[in-house]
Amino acid sequence: MVEVPPDAQVKFVMRDRALLKTPEGVNPSSIRIQMNATQYVAGDAAIKTTELADPPDAVEVVFQPPGGFPRPPPSPC
């Protein structure tokens, strides 16, 4: 869990490797991200994917929900 600004984009790299260490790759159309009660799927404007050449079994995913991330609650201090 991490707190991010409401207008942030979250970028991460997903890799998929078989149990025998044979690269299988990540199917970009299988990406699903859940934030609170909302699920975003590949093809939604909130998810952008790029297949990477190095490593060849990886996909870069950029996630930015419509309307941004929820603002954190005010600090009690």
Image (cartoon, helix red, strand yellow):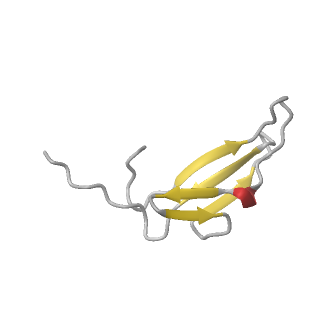
User: Considering only vertical position in the picture, is 65 above or below 19?
Assistant: below
Q: Is residue 76 left or right of residue 6?
A: left
Spot occupied by residue 9 in the image (x, y as percentages of width and height): 50, 57
Q: Where's the N terminus, which quadrant? A: top left
In the image, what residue occupies the spot 46% across and 62% down? 37
Residue 59: image location, x then y, percent: 72, 49
Q: What residue is drawn where x is 30% and y is 55%?
A: 72
Q: Quadrant of residue 15?
A: top right
Residue at the (13%, 45%) spot, across then down: 77
In-front residue for pair 18/5 = 18
Q: What is the total number of numbered labels drawn onto the structure image? A: 0
Q: Residue at x 32, y 60 (%)?
A: 71
Residue 33's image quarter? Answer: bottom right
Instruction: In the displayed orientation, state which residue is furthest to the front.
Output: 37
User: In the displayed structure, would residue 60 be above or below residue 15?
Assistant: below
Q: Quadrant of residue 46?
A: bottom right
